[in-house]
Image (cartoon, grey):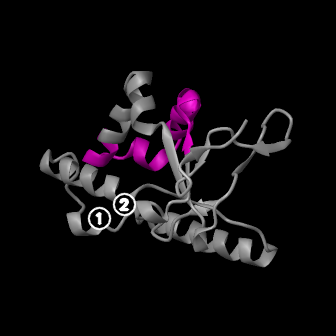
């Protein structure tokens, strides 16, 4: 698993992680899925955040390039039941939490929001497989270490729930 070619949000560290992850997958001969967001969703959110001056250091034309076109996204995963764990993990991500800019304040407000709001805003994760290959995503049960098909994974092209 890695980031999309833009590193999700264009951050240079994320772009580098994507480059290293893609090369590692190539060397190992394994499938890779890239974490992303629908570009169309990013464009709508960007317009709103810029209009409300919630972020000011970004340009709309730059933000429109973030993410992946919805037509290229191959998997969508419902992670709402893991919202508390996801919020805790994001809370220790140092840079956006400790920053002083408007984006950092917005990020902290999201982290402090009631769990149902956080769940609604962050309850879906999207992935794209280079080449458009689709299929079951395999997750690892962190308590046993055993792999199993993720019951919440959805192929965007098939747009159906995978069997339990």
Q: Is residue 102 left or right of residue 71?
A: left
Task: Name the image quarter holding the N terminus.
Answer: bottom right
Name the magenta segment's main secondary structure: helix
The quarter of the picture where residue 61 lies is bottom left
Does the residue at mark 1 contact the one at mark 2 (Cβ under 8 Å)?
yes
Which residue is nearer to you in this view: 6 or 149? Answer: 149
Residue at 60% of width from left, 65% of height from top?
A: 129
Q: How far apart are marks 1 and 2 (CA)?
A: 7 Å
Give the SS element for disc 1: loop
Residue at 57% of width from left, 45% of height from top?
A: 160
Residue at 45% of width from left, 69% of height from top?
A: 6
Q: Earlier in the sequence, mark 1 or mark 2?
A: 2
Identify whether 11 is placed above or below 123: below
Membership of 88 in magenta stretch: yes
Identify whether 120 is placed above or below 96: above
Magenta-highlighted residues: 77-105
Which residue is nearer to you in this view: 69 or 122? Answer: 69
Residue 9 seen by the camera: no
Q: Where is residue 14 drawn, in percent x and y?
A: 51, 63
Q: Residue 39 carries which label?
A: 2
Dot 1 corresponds to which residue?
64
Q: Where is residue 147 drawn, in percent x and y?
A: 82, 45
Give the SS element for disc 2: helix
Which residue is nearer to you in this view: 147 or 28? Answer: 147
Tell how many labels: 2
Task: Name the image quarter holding the C terminus.
Answer: top right
Q: In this view, does 50 lie to the left or right of 3?
A: left
The quarter of the picture where residue 84 lies is top right
């Amino acid at each position: 698993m890695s980031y999309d070619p833009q590193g999700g949000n264009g951050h240079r560290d994320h772009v580098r992680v994507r480059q290293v992850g893609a090369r590692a997958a190539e060397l190992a001969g394994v499938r890779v899925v890239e974490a992303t967001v629908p570009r169309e969703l990013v464009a709508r959110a960007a317009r709103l955040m810029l209009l409300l001056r919630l972020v000011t250091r970004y340009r709309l034309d730059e933000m429109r390039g973030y993410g992946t076109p919805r037509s290229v996204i191959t998997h969508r995963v419902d992670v709402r039941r893991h919202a508390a764990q996801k919020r805790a993990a994001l809370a220790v991500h140092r840079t956006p939490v400790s920053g002083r800019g408007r984006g950092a304040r917005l990020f902290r407000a999201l982290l402090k929001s009631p769990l149902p709001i956080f769940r609604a805003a962050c309850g879906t994760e999207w992935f794209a497989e280079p080449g458009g290959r689709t299929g079951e995503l395999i997750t690892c049960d962190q308590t046993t270490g055993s792999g199993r098909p993720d019951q919440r994974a959805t192929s965007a092209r098939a747009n159906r729930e995978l069997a339990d």
